Image: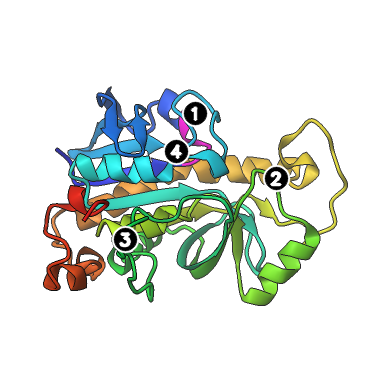
Amino acid sequence: MSKLAIMGGSAANELIAKKHFGSYKKVPAKKTPFGKVSDIRLYKSSGLEFYFLPRHGADGYHTAAPFVNYRANIWALKQLGVERIISWSGPGIINPGLEVGSFAVPGDIIDQTKNRPSTFFEKGGLGFIRMSHPFCPDLRHALIYSLENLSLNFHNESIYCCTEGPRLETPAEIKLYHSYGADLVGMTLAPEAFLARELEMCYASLCYLTNFAEGMVNREFEGGVLFEGMMSPGEKKTVDKAVKKMPEIIVGALKAVLDHSRDCQCKNAMERYRKQGIITDNWRKWIDP
């Protein structure tokens, strides 16, 4: 049983098909209080074992970001004994100082989603927990170490604005998010990061930057292509190269934390409730205390 997991984004399926992560075996479907999760794989790569969950579906982009069952996914990984999760995302760029095809390790998040269940604790009065570091500092440091070890260009401490989708954002919305201080805009890290924290799991994200957000650069509409003209052919080639680096970066980060204890505060997120006797260490009972 591995304590490590990767949650893959929209580019996951091609990498899986080409065995960029090594050999794997499918994990039997996991039943959760929030639905069934059937797309988890257990990988073995260079002496490392980790679970891989493609959040949009195993055989293609079948589930858009607003309709991903985030609660079931996080719960299923917790059932498998996972303690640390590295996710990936391909956001757009709001900060004009960033480059298409480079990488980012978000340090904070702005949640602009509207209709997604964002907590496990719909009853019982739980979940009033601090979010000073919504992404695990230890996992972030591991990702930074891996990126530096590979001499790759990346942006540290990015602020990721998560929108509802599935549509892309309007120019006015991007101006608003820029005024908030957002560097990136995507659709997947919320509520994923918050749900992981509620179950006291470490969670961090590696982003490859796909395109400039609407209104950041002047691009004509082009029908029939990804982002309808917001990504040039040259930028697409650069992004494709970046995506192929994702497995190497993430596996390098997982190796960096493999033999280290969890010294962060993620594992103590619910400690106040334990001390008060409201919950026990049996996390499965937390949703119905």
Is any atom of residue 14 visible in this view?
yes
Closer to the chain start, of discs 3 and 2, is 2
Task: Name the kind of residue labelled 2 in the image.
Answer: Arg
Separation of marks 1 and 2 at Cα, in angstroms:
23 Å
Asked which secondary structure carries label 3, the reply is: helix
Ranked by sequence position, the earlier of labels 4 and 2 is: 4
C-alpha distance separating marks 1 and 4: 14 Å
Q: Residue at x 22, y 46 (%)?
A: 82
Query: Can you tell which mark lies on residue 14?
Result: 1
Query: Which dot marks residue 81?
Result: none
Q: Between disc 1 and disc 3, whose residue precedes?
A: 1
Question: Callout 3: 10 Å neighbours few (<14), some, many (20+)?
Answer: many
The answer to whether the residue labelled 3 contacts the one labelled 2, judged by CB atoms less than 8 Å apart, is no
Give the magenta part as a residue range: 9-14
Residue 12 painted magenta: yes
Kindly identify which residue carries mark 3: 197
Q: Nearer the viewer, mark 4 or mark 3?
A: 3
Label 2, secondary structure: give it. Answer: loop
Q: Which mark is residue 55?
A: 4
Image position of 156 (left or right of 223): left
Q: CA distance from mark 3 to mark 2?
A: 28 Å
Query: Which SS class for mark 4?
Result: loop
Q: Residues within 10 Å of mark 4 (few under 14, many from 20)?
A: many
User: Which numbered disc, 1 or 3, marks the residue closer to the eye?
Assistant: 3
Residue at mark 4 to residue at mark 2: CA–CA distance:
18 Å
Disc 2 marks which residue? 167
Q: Position of residue 36 (x, y in %)?
A: 34, 30
Q: Residues within 10 Å of mark 1 (few under 14, many from 20)?
A: some
Q: Which structural element holds mark 1? A: helix
Q: What is the x, y in percent for residue 181?
A: 61, 75
